Structure formats: C-alpha cells, structure tokens
Amino acid sequence: MTPERKKKIARIIATWFVTGIMVSVFVLDIITVALANKYVNSLIILPYSHQKSTTADRIHFLNTANSDCIIIESNGRFALVDSGEGNNNPRRKTEYKGYEKEVLDYIQRVCADENGKVHLDFILATHVHYDHAGNFESIIKNGDITIGKAFIKDYTTNMLTETEAEAWGNRQIYDGIISALKDKSVPVISILPTEPFAFGDFSLQLFNTVTPEGMEGLGDNANSVGVKLRKGEKSAFLGADFTNDGGLEGIYAQQIGDVDLLKIGHHGYFGSSSPEFLRELKPEIAICTNYIGKIYPNVKWNLTMTAKVPILSTEHRDGIVTEFTDNDIIIYEKIM
C-alpha cells in the first residue's frame, strides 16, 4: 500500500471517528433535553407577581443571561449574592450584554421601602470573575442603596490561570468594588464566617471560606464561595462556580449534604455537577443561570440521568423565584 493510500485511509477513519462523536453528542443532547422537559412538566410553576411582605422567605434568581445575580429575602430583609454582568467587562467588552439597569430596576422594585430606599444587610461576591462581580460597583455607588457589610475574600494572584492574569481584569474588578465600598464606608469582611448564621428565617452557611491548598493556577473559580440556606425541612445550595475539575465539588460535597434545590455550578459548563456530587447532595430541583442550550450535554446527562431532576433556566423562565415554607418550595417564573 502506497503512503498516499495510507494517509487517505487514515483521514477517512479520523473523519468517521469525529463524525461519530459529534452525532453521539447531538443524540445525547436531544435525550437529555427531552428528559429535562419531562421532569419540568411534573412541577407546578406559577407566574410571579411580587407582593411586599415582612414574612416571606424567598430566593430570587435574576435573568442576567449566563451570569449570577441572586437576592435572598427573609422577613423583609434582603441580601445580594453576586451582581450579574456589568456593562464594562474588561474581558469581553462587546460579546455579552451588561445588566446594570435590569438588576438595579429589580432591586428597586423588590427591595425598596415606601420611600424608594433599599437596604441590603450584606452583599457577597462569591469570586471576582466579571460574570459574578462585575455589576457590584454600580450597585454600591447607587444613591438609593445602603449596604450593611460586604463579604469578599482578599484578592490573590496565585490562583489565576495565565489567561486570567493577562486579560480578564480580576484585579481591576476587585479594586473597583473595594474602592466603592470604602467611599460609602461599608465594612468589608474578608475573613468569612465558617459557622452557620441566621438571616431572617433562613440559616446560612458559607463554604470554601478559605481556599484549600493546592489550588494554585486552577483559576478564580476555585476561590468560589458556596452558600447553603435552610428553612425548616427545606434547603438550597447556591453553587457559584463550584466544579469537579476545580476540586471544590469533591472537597465539600459531604459537608454540604442533602439539599432540595441546587443552583448548579459554573452555569452548567463542563466540569460542573459531577455524578458523585449530585449523588451526595440529592437535589430535587436544579436551577441554571444560563441559556438552556449552553449547558454542556454531559452536565445535562448527569442532572437528568444521575439526579433525575428538572433543570430550570433563568433565561428561559425570565428569572425564577423560589419561596420557602417550612415544608415546601413554591416556584415562580417570569419575574423580570
């Protein structure tokens, strides 16, 4: 057989191999989407009409595309976990839309008192990637918003990948937040509490308050702070950018324990929601802050086949509110 013939056969085999993989992924995605829709159809999801309340216990997952912005509400008190994508991303100035106006409008509508003033008991930046912390500066600077305290880890460079260090502007994002907090005399808590603490009717516990050793170079996702909330018999875990390949799922799964609701880590991208993590947490509902089509097929497979849970997309639902009673979680959509 001539060398040219061997090369041609090798190219044909490689083409069929790649085509087979692509077809398999496509079929897998169709199966997982169908299963996810089946599970979602088993839920009761109500249209949302916000009612001011001094007793409600809610988690608001805003629709900020593939970025995180979550409001915790309990007994008329409010806190903000991440801020959504801002309008001046140093990493991608034009690729993603900023959500400063939408987030500020929602905070004003939901959290303001009769005088239009908002008090947030605390804000938490889970880490300083722009899709989690990029909008904090505009929120902090807003004249109608006061903040009791800010949870944010000290900035460190040893975690950064080369790409982050060169182009993502993490330091710029962190410095902007700290400067805005200083200008408004908001206390900055960089040593995060490790024990559960009360917030209204919720008990809150922070995970990954101190990033474990050996994470150098894995990226700022490995700095992510997760939040577990509990009220009565029901609980939720807000997974920030917890991933398995970043190590956090394996380290903290047993400590987190069973939850009813999971805000899946890293927007459903590769490396999140491993089968082992899902088996440990046993969620009954999964919420993804992303477009449903951007969730990786293997992640959808893990959620639908391992956990057998419905996946609710904040983009598809135009935001989601979950209201906690002592023994139930009520789901609302179209909040924005």
Image (cartoon, grey):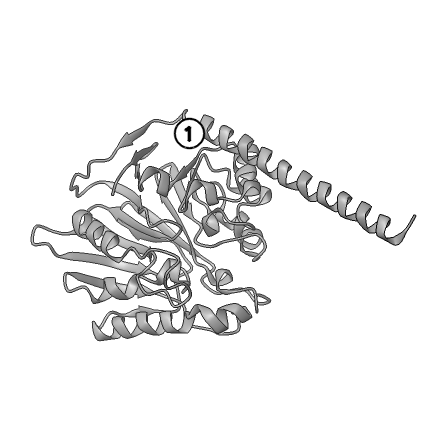
User: Where is residue 235 drawn, in percent x and y?
Assistant: 39, 41
User: Where is residue 48 drawn, in percent x and y?
Assistant: 24, 35
Q: Residue at (39%, 62%) from the top-left corner?
A: 130
Q: Would residue 325 be seen by someone viewing this image from the given angle? A: no
Q: Residue at (34%, 57%) from the top-left corner?
A: 85
Residue at the extreme left: 115
Residue 45 higher or lower than 2, as above or below: above
The part of the image, by quadrant, that contains residue 324 is: top left
User: Where is residue 12 drawn, in percent x and y?
Assistant: 76, 44
Report how many numbered discs are placed on residues in the image. 1
The part of the image, by quadrant, that contains residue 197 is: bottom left
Circle 1 Cα neighbour tier, 10 Å, few/some/many (<14 / 14–19 / ≥20): some
Q: Amino acid at mark 1?
A: Val
Residue 18 higher or lower than 163, as above or below: above
73 or 258: nearer the eye?
Answer: 73
The part of the image, by quadrant, that contains residue 217 is: bottom right
Mark 1 sits on what residue? 40
Q: Secondary structure at mark 1?
A: helix
Q: Quadrant of the C terminus?
A: top left
Q: Residue at (22%, 63%) from the top-left corner?
A: 147
Residue at the extreme right: 1
Q: Residue at (32%, 65%) from the top-left corner?
A: 88
Q: Going by the image, does 308 lie left or right of 146? A: right
Q: Would residue 36 be seen by someone viewing this image from the given angle? A: yes
User: Where is residue 153 drawn, in percent x and y?
Assistant: 40, 68
Residue 4 higher or lower than 315, as above or below: below
